[in-house]
Amino acid sequence: MRWRKKPPQLNTIIKMKKILFLIAVLFVAVSATAQLATLAIPAGQTYKTYSTTHTITNTTAGYFLYNAIQQVPTTQDYIVRLDSVSGNHTNVAVVLHGQKFPESAWTTIATVNWKGTTADTTILISNATANRYINYKVTFTGTGSGVTSIKNQKFKLYFE
């Protein structure tokens, strides 16, 4: 019995299938948390409002990035209004993270959970411990089967 090599075209097709599979896996991994917006707070400024409404579901967490390169340590306040659109989110976790360098890991600053027992709520996160983060990320993760809208965000830095 003679073993034959696969034709070159077949090898190319197999490689293309592997590449397409890898791209599909990466797409699924990236879509598990969706970046909703990137907002900048220029050096020397301390306040940012964002009134565009976004929605999250129980299948996709959403997050907002605040780039705030400041030259002094800061404390932070973040306020947001959540509104139940449909279904029932049994919990929405709102987590404020900080990052010292774009290459470094995110550090959790504070977490607030909304149990979805009211039609809407306002969440306030206040961090009174000064830190030196240049990027902030606010992540919204819903559990249960529902749709929640995120409205009227305000992010404030206090120079310490």
Image (spheres, rainbow, N blue to C red):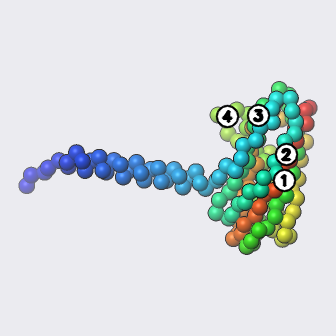
> Residue flagged by tag 3: what amino acid is it?
Ile
Residue 86 occupies quadrant: bottom right
Q: What distance separates the C-alpha of mark 2 from that of mark 4?
A: 23 Å
Q: Which residue is mark 2?
A: 49
For the C terminus, the image quarter is top right
Residue 32, horizontal then vertical, whole percent: 61, 56
- What is the secondary structure assignment of the residue under circle 4? loop
| Left or right side of 124 for 103 | left
Q: Nearer the viewer, mark 1 or mark 4?
A: 1
Whether residue 91 is situated above or below residue 62 in the rendered picture: below
Residue plotted at (76% across, 48% down): 138
Q: Earlier in the sequence, mark 3 or mark 1?
A: 3
CA neighbours of label 2 inside 10 A, class few (<14), some (14 to 19), many (20+): some
Q: Which residue is mark 4?
A: 102
Q: Are marks 2 and 1 in contact (CB under 8 Å)?
A: yes
> Residue flagged by tag 4: what amino acid is it?
Pro
> Residue flagged by tag 1: what amino acid is it?
Asn
Residue plotted at (77% across, 37% down): 40
